Amino acid sequence: MTNRDRVRDVVDAPWFNRFIIVVIVVNTIGLGLETSPELMATHGTLIHGVDVAAIVIFVVELTAKFYAYGFKFFLDPWNWFDMVVVGVALVPATETFAVLRALRIMRALRLISQVPSMRRVVTALLSAIPGLLSILGLLLLVLYTSAVVGVQLFRNAAPELFGDLSSSLFTLFAVMTMEGWQSIAEQVMVVYPAAWVFFIGFIVVTSFIVLNLLIAVLVSTMENQLSAERWEEDQSLEAVQHERVMEELRLLNHKLAEVQAALPQLSEPDRTGETAGAAPASPDEPQPTREDRADSDRQPEPAA
């Protein structure tokens, strides 16, 4: 086993992954404690030391993974994510990069790449983007159409809410979130009592139907991903079982070959032992017929 294989075994070990998760959690807590002036005044050196130690561990981890996998390291998108998050922490603490230094808390997001369940959820979200974009387009189309209808119907009743397209869009977005929509509807219903039909229909379409469509797409994508992962696990398990069966067959064939090779040596002494007590018959000597054997078997009669 080469040194690269040993390093790969270490970085892929479950205990190493758990150790990195603990470091991420501790570092995240330390970054939160840095926001307290009182704690920084009393324990600032310790908190800063923990932050530096965490950065060193992250750099060593990424270096070890790169050494273990070589250029295959860059084929995993999560490795790129970890490189960006750790790289932000290495930015010099100057006024020019003050904004980037404020993004050090992004190191907490490394939990996503380390915890398989979180990684599965994020992967499902990314895989569901095409379907989500279609639903988002449908939602925007309904919102735009309803805003135009609202301007045409309720401009005179509530000009501050439906006076133009922009104000109508903002008002209907607030209605879609169901935040204070009763007061908006009541203000319009003072002039148009039947306006509740418009608002309830808009809420049902946007807040219930479209939201359920979003949830359905996400759930379907996660189920497909879980099915794909289970299929890969089944394939790997079948491959291991197949290799085990083939190994047993090879052992049986080897033992069978050994038995077949030993059979001539065991049967040769038996054949020689069977013929040792009897002399071979001469090929020129006539063989007794059936009548001769019958006469020899007949007993002689006693004399009178």
Image: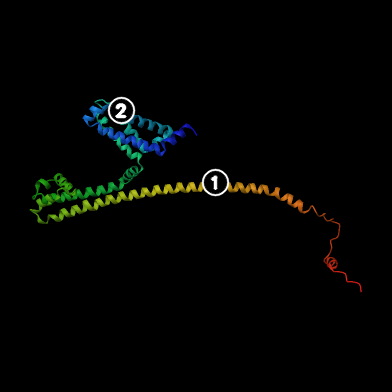
Residue found at x 34% / y 39%: 113
| Place of residue 270 in the rendered image (x, y in percent of width and height, measured from the top left) | 73, 51
Q: Are marks 2 and 1 in contact (CB under 8 Å)?
A: no
Q: Amino acid at mark 1?
A: Glu
Residue found at x 29% / y 51%: 216
The residue wearing badge 1 is 247
Q: Quadrant of the C terminus?
A: bottom right
Colour scheme of the rendered structure: rainbow
The residue wearing badge 2 is 49
Q: Quadrant of residue 20?
A: top left
Decide which of 163, 131 is in the foreground and name it. Answer: 131
Point out which mark residue 14 bears. Answer: none
Q: Is residue 97 visible?
A: no
| Place of residue 198 in the rendered image (x, y in percent of width and height, measured from the top left) | 15, 54
Report whether 241 appears left or right of 181.
right
Q: Is residue 17 above or below residue 144?
A: above
N-terminal-most mark, 2 or 1: 2
